[in-house]
Amino acid sequence: MTPIIQSLLDTDLYKFTMWQTMLHRHPQAQAEYRFVCRNTPAFPLADLLPEVNAQLDHLCSLSFQEDELAYLGALRYIKPDFVDFLRIFRFQRRFIQAVADGPTLRIVAEGPQVHVMAFEIYVLAIVNELYFRRADQAAAVAEGRRRLNAKIELLESLGREVKHRHPFEFFDFGVRRRFSRAWHAEVVETFKTRVPQYFKGTSDVRLAQQLDLVPIGTMAHEYLQSYQAFDVRLRDFQRLALENWVQEYRGDLGVALTDVVGMDAFLADFDLYFAKLFDGLRHDSGDPVVWGEKALAHYAKLRIDANTKRLTYSDGLDLPEAFRLYGHFADRVQLGFGIGTNLSNDVGLQPLNIVMKLTRCNGQPVAKLSDSPGKTLCDDETFLAYLRQVFNHTI
């Protein structure tokens, strides 16, 4: 068996930032995460079960190395006690199970949240790479390199043509759905070498360490969703989550995710206090232009100069779509584009649309009411109906 995860830094930065916050604020929380494939694979994912279990066994044998801990500790927002926690941390195999349910691969991580929340990205990277190992590797990499060169040429040509107040900047968000670890590293290094004027970092902490790049990330849906199950009135869960984040990071990592219960409900909570404290907002569902215009209107209403803020887009982007949005907004607000699958798995094969989402916390259901149909993941219709009613969400 060739291990897919060879370093525990090989995950998204926001797993560490959320992990630290939960360790400090809610160390007693219990959680359940479930793996789901949203599209139809070329063969049943249950066929991968023996290999998945072998990779999970290996993952649970890993620990953080001293050079990795030193790298994390040098990030000014990572606290010494969290580094000490990671020094003794090991994944517990009993907290994660993978089984076959007919052709379907079922993976569930359940236990103390600070012990199970980090499984997500590793599991997705494992399933992806095992799945694509069955394809023609040489042909896929050759096609990937051809497409990568075309992206570089597009960046160079469009970059010469557009002149706006704010620069075009994009980042790699491709860990979870990459074709392979090796291909992901090649893509990121190629962008760093050939278009450093546009390519500004990666969410993959291991690649950031190896290639001297800025690690990118703040929070994901699971962070805000967890607060739906904490000791707070449901209507106030977003405010408490944002307040805890502000208290934890005190000016660092200031990009807030907006679509856990929809943009309109988010903006109702994102008052002048939060709008001044956070550097910007991240889009992950719904019409990106409509979302951006709502954000700019909100800043204008609060008499905040949007040119001092940043809108980050991360919903299924490719470079042409990023340039379209850049052309629309770049004279009014700073922008960033986090591109995932289209960078790390654009090799001529149909990517998997897989996720591993928080489904329960402290024994209660939690959910995301996305601004895009089909992204909601919750099997408790009663809770979904209640959440929609509380936040007047109709999508």
Image (cartoon, helix red, strand yellow):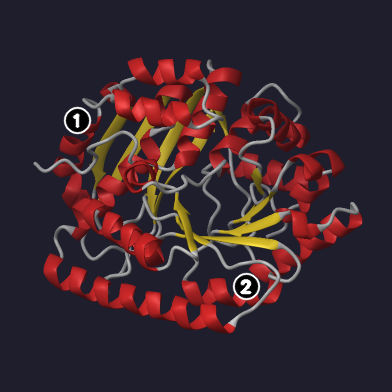
Find disc 1 in the rendering and name its residue.
57
Residue 336, horizontal then vertical, whole percent: 58, 60
Residue 160: which numbered mark, if any?
A: none
What amino acid is found at the position of numbered circle 2 in the picture? Leu
| Relative side of 348 to 392, left or right | left
Residue 171, horizontal then vertical, whole percent: 48, 58
Q: Residue at x 55, y 71 (%)?
A: 322
| Comparing labels 2 and 1, the label whose residue is closer to the camera | 2
Q: Residue at x 32, y 72 (%)?
A: 148
Q: Quadrant of the C terminus?
A: bottom right
Residue 159, horizontal then vertical, whole percent: 53, 77
Q: Mark 2 or mark 1: name the one nearer the start of the chain.
A: 1
Find disc 2 in the rendering and name its residue.
325
Asked which quadrant contains residue 135, the reply is: bottom left
Residue 290, horizontal then vertical, whole percent: 72, 68
Q: Residue at x 21, y 25 (%)?
A: 61
Element type at mark 1: helix
Element type at mark 2: helix
Asked which quadrant contains residue 92, the reply is: top left
Q: How far is the residue under mark 2 from the one under mark 1?
A: 43 Å
| Relative side of 289 to 274, left or right | left
